[in-house]
Image (tube, helix red, strand yellow):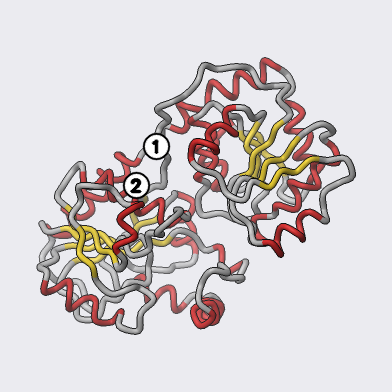
Amino acid sequence: MKIFFDARFTRTRHHDGISRYGSNLLAALSELAPVTGIIHDDAQRALLPTGVPYVKLISPMSPGEPALPAALNRLGADVVFSPMQVMSSFGRKYKLILTLHDLIYYRHPEPPHDLPVAVRAAWRLYHKAYWPQRRLLNRADAIAAVSETTAGMIADHKLTKRPVHVIGNAADPPTDLPPLTNRHDAKSLVYMGAYLPYKNVETLIRSLEFLPGYTLHLSSRIEPYREAQLRELVPNGATVQFHHGVTDDEYHDLLDHATALVSASLDEGFGLPLVEAMSRRTPIVVSDLPIFHEIGDEKALYFPPTDAAALARQVRSLEDPGDWEARATAGPSRAATFSWSRSARTLLTVMEDLCGESAGSPRL
């Protein structure tokens, strides 16, 4: 079985969510079976696992993308996995697994600002109806969803006739976990994520009105115009620290000294920062979303997404040393249920099943 893995959405300097998902899943899959990665820029290798062979093909944003299946046919591909759902498929002779991360942009249509203008325009049009999504997904032999929540949404909206498998997102377990110290009085909150409107960082900032003495650390990179918008919301006397991007070590240090990781997101397909925080014994205080319940279970504290006072009350509950320690110590075992190796084993089983089937899936 000749496996190809679409790594063309890998960033070249810093991972985003999809880039990190693909890179880590590829690394775990390569430990189970021979696999060839597909890149379009040699610089992507810096964020991809070493020891994996790569082929350099067309960029997924290129007008030449329709020629990709012919190239993979020539390379003898038996099965191809993509961490996105937009991979060209016309004329393919191999099995294809496409991924759907979430349905966020049907409810919150603003596209990421780093996409080309033409792609952003197409993005908005694409998310005005579900039928384009159905056409994309039905071109595949199987669909990967990154969570049970997303798999349920796919079923609810009848987005595909193909089998849907949960190839879950995960986080690497920490290798440098320091001794546990009770941080119920640290008065430090950490946010990791984007600043798009649906991320609702505004509620995190407003909650500081009810949390005197607390510092909110906004750890990810932010555009100047967005930083200016958020700074205007900071309550008098409150402290918000903009870190403008942090290394993994710096992020871990913030978590290791925090009272909690916080998120007031209105919508998510997963929540990798939640898993990362729990794995480092940092409690999580998050908005009351189905996906966050899937991740945090009873280990997390929840609040209505736009209720800043309720967020603050949940944070203040962690000022009790016993409550803080109980949630902190329960975190790693919960985080361990989200495993790259488990996801890779599931993906390999799907690939083996597809390649063991008789030909018959339509080649659209």
- Mark 1 residue element: loop
Residue 41: name its quadrant: bottom left
Which residue is drawn at the image coordinates 46% and 33% (left, top)?
335
x, y (%) of residue 258? Answer: 64, 30
Q: Which numbered dot is residue 101?
A: none
In the rendered image, which quarter is residue 261 located in? top right
> Which residue matches tag 1?
172
Task: Answer whether labels 2 and 1 touch (C-beta < 8 Å).
Answer: yes
For the image, the number of numbered tags is 2
Q: Residue at x 63, y 17 (%)?
A: 182
Q: Residue flagged by tag 1: what amino acid is it?
A: Asp
Chain-order first, disc 2 or disc 1: 2
Secondary structure found at label 2 = helix
Of the 4 image quadrants, the one containing the C terminus is bottom left
Q: Which residue is mark 2?
A: 24
Residues under labels 2 and 1: Cα distance?
8 Å
x then y, percent, for residue 322: 67, 15
Residue 364 in view: no
Q: Residue at x 60, y 19 (%)?
A: 326
The residue sitting at 75% across, 40% down in the picture is 311
